[in-house]
Image (spheres, helix red, strand yellow):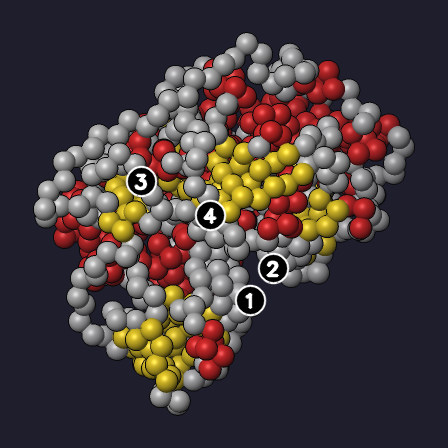
Amino acid sequence: MTLTEKILADHAIGLRRPYVKPGDIIRIKVDWTIASELAWNGMNQTYERLGRPPIHDPEKFYLAIDHTVDPVTIVNDPRTQRLIQLSKAFASEAQLKHFYDSNETILHTKFYRDLIQPGEIVLGADSHTSSHGGLGAFSIGLGGADITVAMALGESWIEVPSAIAIVFNGALPFGVGGKDVILKTLGLLKRNTVAMERSVEYIGPAVSEFSTDMRFTIANMTAELGGLNGIFAPDEVVSAWVAGRESYNTGGKYFKAAEDAEYVERFEIDLNNLSPQIAKPFSPDKTVDIEEVLGTAFDGCFIGACTTTEEELVLGGMILELALADGIKVKETTKRLVAPGDLTIERNLREAGLLDVYRNAGFRIAPPGCHLCLGIASEQAGSGEIWLSSQNRNYQNRMGEGSLAWLASAATVAASALDLTLRDPRAFLERIDRERYMRILGRSDLVRLTPDVSVTYSEPQIDVVEKTSDDESVTSKESEQPAQPEQVIEGRVQIFGDHIDTDAIIPGEFCHLSDIDEIGAKCFHYVRPEFIGRVSDGQTIVVAGEAWGSGSSREHAVWALKGAGVQLVIAKGYAFIHKRNLVNEALPYLLVTDPEFYKLVAEDDELSVDPSSGKILHVASGKTFTAESPSAIVVALTAEGGIVPAIKHYNKEVFAKLAG
């Protein structure tokens, strides 16, 4: 088995054989569920519909207020105040052990640094939950309904993913780090292609020299690659990090992929002499070596967001220190912002004198939070402004309406920050005092990251249950489908292209809404404002290309489609999280890969569709097409009317009944 398969097998409930394989539908025990206040807004609605049951383990639900908060919105914005109070009320109601109030941490930062252990399963209501694969956990983002259910039941279901291996070879120059590695990987492999809905396992000789911070960044941006999860085998580097904690340091399970593990594909990436990477708008895979764009001018710069680690923040501060000493003039502007990911990191930067360096370089210091990365609090980039940012996404309007984000490492942003002109950070990196750098990070060994630490790997503990004639716990996606009554949907088509992300479907600034009609009114607000007027009759069928619903995990994207009156989605491919959200909210979708269908169907064409059979009639031509069959559990959940009606029907046995 692959590393991901071993963790899933270790957590599987009622397996009939001592392994899992791609395509299996299994029940799994869940160690942690995590969410932000923005996600809890939607989760609370699901929780209400479920009757607010006791949660499975109050010590294993982690809630942080980070997405919408900054000092201005907390005081002045009623929407933010409502989200904060909603989260606080639930934290008190459920007696959560791990609740973090406004501007204490970014959702993933503290969880990764202080709590997650190797071999655990984490489900989070945020697409960047993939971050925690950096410590060898199986960690994925899902929509809020899935997380609410797992929070309540302590279990979920999953289709075991196929896997690709990305093999890192060579050695990185000092200071060229995890952000550059994952941007290079995105540039080579492209987002939502070979990694789409798959497990991405990072291996190779170079990995042993990757710090846990570097692994975090690479796993974090596996979401941009389109992977279901990104994961590193936990090794001595991980063991040393976990051992250094005061708690949550003894429960890890150290697995690694078998020597003969089956990967769909393997990709070799040479890191020798890797240049700092830049991603241009509007995609994180639109990357170039920095040499190609040196001298580009920017309106502002941002160092922060969940993907920017303590290492990067320290390195950025030390580069700014050198740049100031070199006499580079600080251009007058208020458009420089740095946001440490956690109060402990902020304190460390202050004690090292680096917060003062950031201030002297013209940066405003923000408390922990998402800030400009999401562009929905008070900090936003203006229309037409070009920003250099160390965040993870540069989609259209991501930092604010009309903004243009260029992505880079914090080192590159810092090197370019004084005069807002793109500079190569290597001229500064070669002069960094590495002993001081390591001391600030609390490391004493300059050569190895793992002094006096060893790891013993184990195999998953699988309790195989005897198979009976009428009971199966592993269901293949090709299993026989239950018969469903015909329910024809007739409507006219609106055509969309490839890679339509959830930011496009419903911008983040509207995810505080809870009324379905209000949410629907904002569907495609910026990218296709005429959309709403054309679905007013409630008879629209969306026909789209590859990777429909990629990006953020927000279930608001499905609510927006339903609220706007969309009856059905047909696409060449779907992002994993969005597809689960469609199932949970019972919005029918079909997967059609036949190129003839897409050649024939045009804007405003009429279709007649039976979602239960997958039969599609193109009315004008009389031609018919057949969609691919979904798995049995998808059919069953759709027949129940979504996840909440299914739980009301089956209670705690829902996945036992539906997954096999």
Q: Residues within 10 Å of mark 3 (few under 14, many from 20)?
A: many
| Residue 219 in view (yes/no) | no
Label disc, if present, on residue 526 of the rendered structure: 1
Label disc, if present, on residue 20 of the rendered structure: 3
Q: Residues within 10 Å of mark 2 (few under 14, many from 20)?
A: many
| Residue 594 in view (yes/no) | yes
Question: For the residues carrying marks 1 and 2, which lies nearer the camera in this image?
Answer: 2
Task: Using the numbered discs, state the Cα–Cα distance from disc 1 to disc 2 in whole angstroms.
Answer: 9 Å
Question: For the residues carrying marks 2 and 4, which lies nearer the camera in this image?
Answer: 4
Query: Residue 92 appears at what percent x and percent y?
Result: 31, 33
**457 with respect to 171 (left or right):** left
Q: Quadrant of residue 155?
A: top left
* Image quarter hosting the N terminus: top left
Q: What amino acid type is highlighted by mark number 1?
A: Tyr
Q: Spot the residue most to the front.
A: 260
Q: Spot the residue most to the left.
A: 469
Q: What residue is disc 4 on?
A: 264
Task: Using the numbered discs, state the Cα–Cα distance from disc 1 to disc 4 in whole angstroms.
Answer: 38 Å
Element type at mark 2: loop
Q: Spot the residue most to the bottom.
A: 620
Is 230 situated above or below 504? above
Does the CB distance between marks 1 and 2 fall below 8 Å? Answer: yes
Query: Residue 439 appears at what percent x and percent y?
Result: 67, 15
Q: What residue is disc 2 on?
A: 396
